[in-house]
Amino acid sequence: MNEVKALIEKYWDKVREHRWYLHQHPEPSHQEKNTAAYIAKVLREIGLEPTENVGGYGVVALIEGKGPGKCVGLRADFDALEITECTGIPYASQNPGIMHACGHDTHTAMLLGAAYVLNELRDRFDGCVKLVFQPAEEDAADSGAKAMIADGVLENPHVDVMYGQHVWPALPTGKIGVRNGAMMASSDRFFITVRGKSSHASRPEGGIDAIMIASYIVAALQSIVARNVGPLDSAVITIGKITGGTRYNIIADEVKMEGTCRNLNPEVRKSMPERITKIARGIAEGMGGSAEVEYRMCYSPTVNDPEQFKLMCGVITETLGEDTLVIPENSALGGEDFSYYCEKIPCCFNWLGCHEEGTPEYPIHNGHFLVQEEAMPLGMETMVGAALKFLAQ
Ligand code: NI
């Protein structure tokens, strides 16, 4: 493993250069054309033959070892978010209003780094490593993982196991979290349209105020979490977008809202569409309006395979030390489309601590979110180590 460390060090400047480039040129889900082209170019430079446009802008490359064997998949996502960057760093986003606020730039740079290292070690392992660069992780309704699987990413050759990771600001740099079983929650999406009737703002009795109805719905939805979900189960309901009305002095006749639901318990998850629909309709009708709810089941929970969890713990403790491994008590309620791979083959997903101690902690999806780059070599070592360990079995 010292050799892996040495190779990571050898390529570190290049990896950081890729990370800075990707960070400066973020592209949102389904628009990652330039990012995909960049990844393919880097892979070609080291003699790999990437396949492009797999399930959208997905890029896949195979590193074949010295003889026949199993195939291990390593996955990184590469889409960005519609957020204005506020970090003030020299390599901040050059695309106004778009930012790598979920750290997918670092995931991709780390997988490019793993490609350099594994490519140099290819005469040292049997089997092959499939590098999966995935677009559109952030679009729960039209997931990149789902599209890549539909486009055959897990076949030819068949992928036996898959590893992935996410930078994790709740853990300091130097720690890596991994759980046996559920890591991340289901992530579903819903749309509510409230209809009322417009009127002059001074004549409310002549209209039906869709904005007021929507306000009550937003507040009442939280009663599902408080009163319908058991205190020991988990649920989050968030309305993240709301639009309605045309002018300050007109009572709005329509409001559109979009939200997400997160669960770890499949039974609780199943009950959500009906609860949300009943509340939205009941309140709207009680106030003279109407509400329509469209509920889309999207990502399942991301669940680690017990064997692969064990392997990952071994890699982390053997190569990075006992102190690096953290086994978090709870899953996170964030969603992750890595769950689609978990449904098909044994997988393991880890949380790469990336918070610089002594600095303010900003969550992912925040304009100030920044990965401490010193975490990246640890992430590469984990991915490379897991691949080599699995292939050596
Ligand atoms: Ni993410």
Image: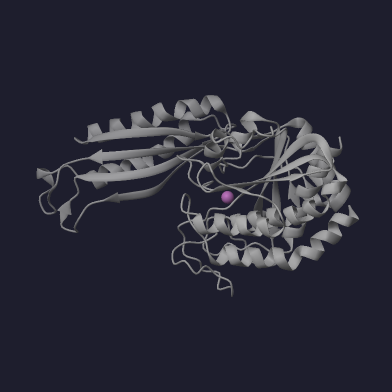
Q: Is residue 177 visible?
A: yes
Q: Is residue 103 visible?
A: no
Q: Is residue 123 left or right of residue 155?
A: right
Q: Nearer the viewer, residue 229 or 186?
A: 186
Is 330 rendered above or below residue 282? below
Q: Nearer the viewer, residue 127 or 164?
A: 127
Residue placed furthest toward the right = 2
For the point 34% across and 44% down, the residue is: 257
Q: Is residue 322 left or right of residue 81?
A: right
Q: Is residue 9 left or right of residue 187?
A: right
Q: Is residue 143 left or right of residue 115?
A: left
The picture quadrant where one finds residue 69 is top right
Residue 38 lies, in percent from the top left, at 58, 59
Residue 44 lies, in percent from the top left, at 66, 56
Is 388 rendered above or below residue 265? below
Q: Nearer the viewer, residue 248 or 100?
A: 100
Residue 117 lies, in percent from the top left, at 79, 55
